[in-house]
Structures are given as C-alpha cells and as structure tokens.
Image (spheres, rainbow, N blue to C red):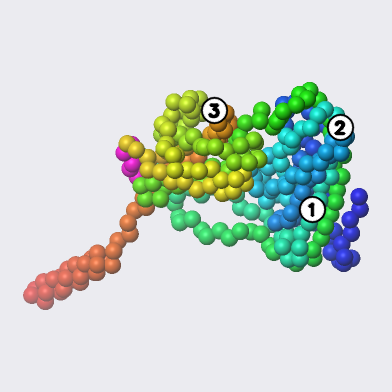
Amino acid sequence: MTTRARSPTTLPVITTAHISQNTAHYPSPVIVYARVSQGFLPVLGINVTAIIENEDGHQVTLELWDNGAGADTVKNDGIYSRYFTDYHGNGRYSLKVHAQARKNTARLSQQQNKALYIPGYAENGKIIPNLPKPEVKEDVAEAEMDGFSRVSSGGSFTISVVPPNGNHSQVFPPGKIVDLDAKFQGDRIQLSWTAPGKVLDKGRADSYMIRTSKHVLDLQENFDKAALINTSGLIPKEAGSVENFEFKPEPSKIENGTTFYIAIQAVREPNVTSEVSNIAQATNFIPPQEPSIPDLGTNISAISLAIFGLAVIVSIF
C-alpha cells in the first residue's frame, strides 16, 4: 500500500502491521503489532484499531496501545500492540489495521532521556547526597499534522488445536505488570503501575497481591513467602488504566538509607495469577539539612566579637 502526504514537502505517515507468529497453537496467544511513523519519527496519540477476521467471516475489533504495558514492550515508540485471544475455531485469520488521527491530535516523539535518577549513595556507612534531580519535561514535540487515516494489511496467520466450544480466552492468565514504580513519601511507600487485564491485557483483574522485602532475592526466588501487604481496599481498574497505591511498611524500622523491594501479581478468581511483576525499589533518603540563617548570623557575630577582642588587646598593648 502506498501513502502520500497532502503536501509534497511533508513526509507521509506510514502504517505497517504484522503478527508475532504466522502459526499459533492453542492456547498460545498471538500479538498484533502496528507501527505508525513519519519519516524516522514515531507518531503518538492516535487511534489504532486492528480488525481480525476468520474464514467464516467472524470479525474481532481490537484497540492497539502504545503504553509500554501488556503486549507493548516500549511506551511511546510508535509501535501499537495488543494480545489477540478471541479464537473462533481453527483455520486462517486475516489482519487489517486502521490508524486514524484528527487534526492536531497526533504528535511526533523525539529522543527521551531514560537515565535513572539516584538521590544518593552510601559510603562508609554515611549517606552521601547527589545533586537535586533536574526538572525533566516530556521531550515530545507537538506535530503540526493534518488529520489522516491509514489502512494497512497485516497478512494472515493460522490457528490450530482450538477446542470446538466454550470461552477459550479463560485459559489465559492476567497480564504481567512490567512498569511497577515505587518511591518513599514520608514514612509511606507510593506505588504506580499500568493495570493488566483479567485475561492478559483485556478486562479487569479481580485483585492484586503485593509483597515486599528488604532483600531482592526474596521476591526473585520465593515470592510467595515475602511479606504480604494488605490490599483489601484496592479495587483493580480496567486494563490500561494507571493504578496508584500506598502503604506503610510495618513493623520494619525505617532509617535513612533503608531500601524496600516490592513486586505484584494480578489475580483472577479462583486463584489464577499473573507472572510476578518487575521488582521496584524504594529507598528512604533524607537529605542533610543546610545551615539555617540564624546559625550563620551567630557565626558572623562570633567572628566579629573575636576581631573586636583582638583589637582591644592590641590597643591595650
């Protein structure tokens, strides 16, 4: 398919689509990808929809996301992705992708700084602070783009070994959380992540299981035995939503430099869990207090008094 921009001086917006595998065997999920770009720059903030049709004409419409969660590996890279699990029989399925944007809603992404900020470090038992974290603005340039609509064919793929009847998507667990973030706020730890679904990245999980430890290996090797956080008041949101939760680590003693590691599993009843999330780290860092103005004034007064005393001594002699 050939796409052209309205202006000869403007690069066209290109949409390409493909599937993670040409042949899938139930219960293996398939990932749908669509790349939207203008020149070398990814196009963000648009609606990208996949239409998947089997040989009998049954269609499934799937909204693709570029949020860095679920099937999408990197956020805001212009590659929109989603799991496809709505199998309706064996055979060949075709893929078509529709990318659409109204005027001034799409934007082009520039290179973003992904460096991790470390507030301080320990040296000989003392906390040494780094310089304050600089204010970082989203390095995304708003594109002066006309509205556009692109349709791209992603070819076809084959599904086999699908049982004849029933809801086949229920064999898939909730999606793995991959963007868990943690930070201290006072004596509490604040968490944020993108909500997975009840079935991979579709629907709403029934609950979350959050565990924490001061030792990262506890979560890596023995997640089920790490300390469990009370999440009875945490109601999961729809897949793709931003989740926020905070808790107070107890009964651990929290000092300057204390580090906690946290990980999450999403749960679908009865007792179907996702893979353990990425492990987030929260360090309690208390920057040293700078000398107050009264202290500085006291020091100046002391220096002035010493000079005055020296002058008196010199005048006596």
Residue lying furthest left in this view? Answer: 316
Q: Which residues are magenta?
A: 252-257
For marks 2 and 3, give the CA distance. 33 Å
Asked if disc 1 and disc 2 are in contact, CB closer than 8 Å, the reply is no
Identify the mark nearer the N-term, 2 or 3: 2
Using the image as rendered, state which of residue 40 and residue 277 is in the foreground. 277
Q: Position of residue 4 (x, y in %)?
A: 89, 59
Task: Say the numbered circle drawn on residue 92.
Answer: 2
Using the image as rendered, state which of residue 208 and residue 126 is in the foreground. 208
Query: Which residue carries the number 1 mark?
Result: 99
Would you say 78 lies left or right of 233 here? right
Identify the mark nearer the N-term, 3 or 1: 1
Q: Position of residue 273 (x, y in %)?
A: 56, 30
Q: In this orientation, does residue 86 appear?
A: yes
Would you say 38 lies left or right of 269 here? right
| Tag 2: amino acid | Arg
Q: Mark 1 or mark 2: which is in front?
A: 2
Q: Mark 3 or mark 1: which is in front?
A: 3
Query: Which residue carries the number 3 mark?
Result: 271
Using the image as rendered, state which of residue 237 and residue 311 is in the foreground. 237
Q: Tell me the SS state at disc 2.
A: strand
Identify the mark nearer the N-term, 1 or 2: 2
Q: Which residue is rendered at x = 58% and y = 60% of the image?
A: 137
Q: Position of residue 312 (x, y in %)?
A: 11, 74
| Tag 3: amino acid | Asn
Q: Which residue is rendered at x = 79% and y = 23% of the image?
A: 161
Q: Which residue is rendered at x = 91% and y = 53% of the image?
A: 2
Q: Tell me the SS state at disc 3.
A: loop
